[in-house]
Image (cartoon, rainbow, N blue to C red):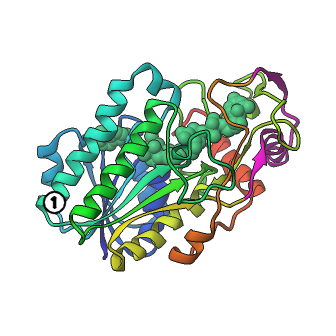
Amino acid sequence: MKNILVTGGAGFIGSHTCVELLNENYNIVILDNLSNSKEGAIERIKTITGKEVKFYKVDLMNLFETEKVFEENQIDAVIHFAGFKAVGESVQKPLEYYENNIGGTFNLIKAMKKYNVKNIVFSSSATVYGVNNKVPYTEDMPTSATNPYGYTKVMIEQILSDIAVSEPEWSIVALRYFNPIGAHESGLIGENPNGIPNNLVPYIAQVALGKLDALRVFGDDYATPDGTGVRDYIHVTDLAKGHLAALKYVEGNPGFQPINLGTGKGSSVLEVLHAYEKACGKELPYNVTPRRAGDIAESYAQTGLAKKLLNWEAKLDIEKMCQDSWNFTIKNPEGM
Ligand code: NAD
Ligand code: UFG
């Protein structure tokens, strides 16, 4: 399997995965409507790798245009990143989220069926573990959600699993990402949120740049070692490499398989803040505020299945994640 269609390939995780794919001599076609990314990301992927990339500015909601991409290219497998991802926004705009994430996936599946492509790696999320499971999360736990974004992931996993039952020649992996942070070592690609960031590390990066005054630590009264929320942060380059391992897996393993991609190790908000202070060489102000609605105390992965099935494990630590985030941030103070 050498020819890979990457939906959402101009985005944060997609762009890093494209770099790793090109470094391993895959041929890639990127499909992205640039709703949450810029075409400059494609140029930067080419600069980092010195390789050519075929790019289609196409919306997955447009079935005709999506099918054309399959018509014009021989595709062996798809990595499907494209979708909306902001939890809070999904509560404000549920219809847009269901339509784009589920509708886009339907069109992609229809096009894949038409062109007889039956291998897919899907971007799922640790959010499918909901609020009732106990850490570390294992892939056999029941899934649930608390917001429309999370429901789109739960539902798409269900749809993909039903397809694998009805058509046993499909080979499907749903990668459940924990908290991807960091950036490519070159500082050319990274996370580029619009407006005030919702997520911890992009927010800290803006504080370190001096664009935001202080980090708001959302609660220090959780039942965790320092009272602040614990998450399983994973370097986006490690995550990207996990997709290459998943591609190899889908080649020989029909069926539907969810797999966690995390480090298995939790870090608290204050630990991340201190690692970032080390990376940027200055003290960063913070104040403790009430808990953020919907947050859980801790989330981290049981990583054994990824090791067993994919022979993959995360290698980079929280210090390196913060160094690479800061390197990207100072090189791109206004974003990409
Ligand atoms: P991102 O927003 O940077 O990338 C998604 C890309 O998809 C963007 O470039 C966007 O323009 C594109 N897109 C969206 N809708 C589209 C459509 N209808 N047609 C074509 N392109 C479309 O997000 P990311 O952080 O790279 O996340 C990638 C995937 O991983 C998403 O599915 C997300 O839900 C999932 N995920 C992300 C995280 C995270 O913390 N970043 C965690 C778990 C899961
Ligand atoms: N936090 C703060 N201050 C901030 C932002 C976050 O204290 O300004 C804390 C949160 O309370 C939490 C931790 O930092 O304890 C991480 O928060 P993020 O918003 O970075 O990440 P979440 O774990 O809440 O959510 C992320 C993605 C979701 C995804 C989930 C599970 O944003 O899309 O991981 O994969 F569903």
Q: Position of residue 42 (x, y in %)?
A: 39, 51
Neighbour class for label 1 at 10 Å: few (<14), some, many (≥20)? few
Location of mark 1 (residue): 113
Camera-side residue of 142 and 1: 142
Q: Position of residue 43 (x, y in %)?
A: 40, 52
- Image position of 243 with respect to 233: above or below: below
Residue 159 falls left or right of residue 305:
left
User: For the point 32% across and 73% down, which residue is it?
Assistant: 254
Q: Position of residue 23 (x, y in %)?
A: 46, 72
User: For the point 73% across and 24% down, which residue is it?
Assistant: 291
Residue 196 falls left or right of residue 43:
right
How many discs mark residues in the rendered view?
1
User: For the point 17% across and 64% down, which residue is it?
Assistant: 73
Res 205 seen here: no
Identify residue type, mark 1.
Answer: Lys
Q: Is residue 284 magenta?
A: yes
Q: Is residue 133 magenta?
A: no
User: For the point 65% across and 62% down, which residue is it?
Assistant: 302
Residue 55 falls left or right of residue 227:
left
Range shown magenta: 265-290
Res 173 seen here: yes
